[in-house]
Amino acid sequence: MASELMEERVFPTQDGNIRYWISQTTDDDLPWLVFLPGLTADHRLFDTQIAHFAGKTNMLVWDAPSHGASRPFALTWSMDDLARCVKGYSNAKE
């Protein structure tokens, strides 16, 4: 990952921690891009896109529960739970 471009954060849940990354510097005048890798991938899937959009947009990428750096995580989640998690850490990004 272009680690110099992104800041790792943790969103705690009762079933485990979700790791996500946001642009190291954000600009209120720029749009947000949210990268959500498929359920067999992790945040590294978007390394090329992150490098390309750096400085042009604010970015957020995650490792879904039970994937990548978001392990261990209880395997009790649903797709609705994933949507609630994205909303939760999106609201907590500041």
Image (cartoon, helix red, strand yellow):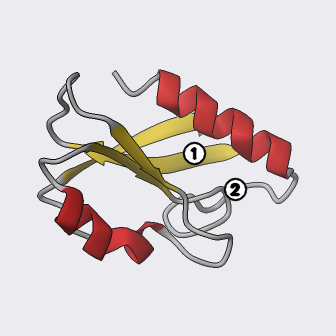
Q: Position of residue 27 (x, y in %)?
A: 17, 28
- Residue 63 visible to the viewer: yes
Decide if residue 91 is on the left or right side of residue 8: right
Q: Can residue 14 be seen in this snapshot?
A: no
Residue 19 falls left or right of residue 93 = right
Q: For the residues marked 1 and 2, what is the alpha-carbon distance in whole angstroms?
A: 7 Å
The reply to whether callout 1 and callout 2 are in contact (CB within 8 Å) is: yes
Residue on which disc 2 sits: 73
Residue at the spot x=72%, y=46% of the render?
82
Q: Whole-percent x and y of residue 89?
A: 52, 32
> Which one is in front, 54 or 23?
54
Task: State the SS at label 2.
Answer: loop
Q: Provide the secondary structure element on which disc 1 rests.
A: strand
Name the residue: 53% across, 69% down: 68
| In the image: residue 74, left or right of residue 48 | right
Kind of residue sitting beneath label 1: Asn
Give the residue pinned by disc 1. Answer: 17
